Image (spheres, rainbow, N blue to C red):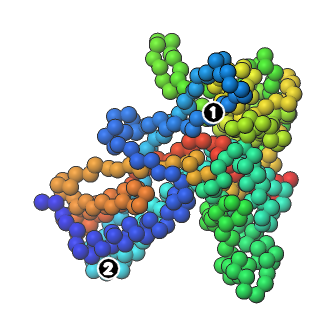
Amino acid sequence: MANSFSKEERVAFDELLAGFQDALVLSNNVSIYNTDQQMMERTNNTIWRPQPYIAVSYNGTDMSQNFDDYTQLTVPATIGIQKAVPWSMTALELRDALQEGRLYDAAKQRLASDINVAVMNVAALQGTLFVKRSAAASGFDDVAQCEAIMNEQGIMDTDRYLALSTRDYNGMASNLAVATRSFGNEISDSALRRAFVGQVASFQTYKLDYAVRQAAASGSGITIDTRTSAGQSYVPRSTSVASTGEVSNVDNRRQVITVNSTANVRVGDAFTIANCEAVHHITKQSTGSLKTFRVTGVPAGGTTLEISPPIIANQGGTDAEAQYQNCVFTSTASNAALVFLNTAAGALNPFWHKDSIEILPGRYAVPTDAGAAVMRGSTDQGIELTMSKQFDVDTLKTKYRVDMVFGVVNKQPQMSGVLMFSQP
């Protein structure tokens, strides 16, 4: 007969679930996509999620030559993060309910942290918008640059979030505490007493007690051929066809480019290309600012780099390039310089639009009649926790474990990025 949970344990699990939900700070500000779990098992826990279409408009009334083929881009999303907190308690330890409660608290803190870290890593390591500030965090002007780069490229002006390392966040709070100082001023009082920033320049801000750090870029003298003849402008495509005839989806978030050298280049480095300007994704007009890219892979012993986003400069003039163009070359050269932006080691402060990042909740099919007691519960986001308990008569120990499974995907890296301070 399966073990059963006591009333106290059920109450403790409910409290664990509530506390877990409250602690999901970053993950509350991304999209949720619920999947059919049977289907996910049959597809190796991977589903292809669509990116938004970008339409092209024309002047006049005669559209006979303008019926374009639209390319639907998709990205793979995988439920592949499995986290568990296991512990055991002896028959003597179980006499103290307080000990058990502390372990529940530790479990919920750890699992909530795992989800927040996963969201932060995806935003910080895969976001391609890069804002470089030469001085330490000081306040509005810093966040306003994040707003500018998003506005210029046509990213929706709602549901924007910025997560800052503790030192950078407190630097902004210091600015607010001084710049708006007056008796009874709610903004400055909150900044002074609680180091609270809140909403700044269309971003809701959050403080991180952990942050991804990026080393200083050390690559130098690296160039790329940006002439049309070099074929470095990427052509988006929905599918690819193998030599054997199989058709498969294509992930268009990355591109492999050829450069003169990859010496000392690291994954995560951010760079611009000489005379390669970002465009507004809808109007295709140049922003006048250089397009930023991130290194996502450095193949060993070669002259190629994997970067994100791809360089879509519409040099080929295809429908797909016109629809998804993200940059323009004001002039081309055989040796256009790559200029690295992360010139000093520091924290990556991610910012993103809510729709760019998705959490895919998963679930375990744990049997309830196999000798262990099982309880389930879901947060408002659909993230399911499974708690199991089993008693070992040989040792008089009771084993507990709390499990969850989920995935995180950055559907559109051009709608997320990082802010770095103290970059000379």
Q: Foreground mark, 2 or 1?
A: 1
Q: Residue furthest top?
A: 244
Number of the label disc, if any, that sits on residue 120: none
Q: Quadrant of residue 288?
A: top right
Q: Is residue 190 left or right of residue 76?
A: right
Q: Is residue 336 left or right of residue 392?
A: right
The residue closer to the viewer here, 386 or 314, is 314
Q: Return the residue at label 2.
A: 97
The residue drawn where x is 20% and y is 55% is 368
Q: Give the quadrant of the N terminus.
A: bottom left
Mark pair 2, 1: CA separation:
61 Å
The residue closer to the viewer here, 298 or 257, is 257
Number of the label disc, if any, that sits on residue 55: 1
Q: Is residue 17 left or right of residue 231?
A: left
The residue drawn where x is 63% and y is 33% is 55
Secondary structure beneath dot 2 equals: helix
Q: Position of residue 415 (x, y in %)?
A: 64, 46
The residue closer to the viewer here, 109 or 371, is 109
Task: Give the residue type that dot 1 points to.
Answer: Ala
The residue drawn where x is 75% and y is 46% is 152
Q: Position of residue 39 (x, y in %)?
A: 34, 37
Task: Give the residue type that dot 2 points to.
Answer: Ala
Q: Residue furthest front?
A: 61
Q: Quadrant of residue 316?
A: top right
Q: Is residue 160 above or below residue 78?
A: below
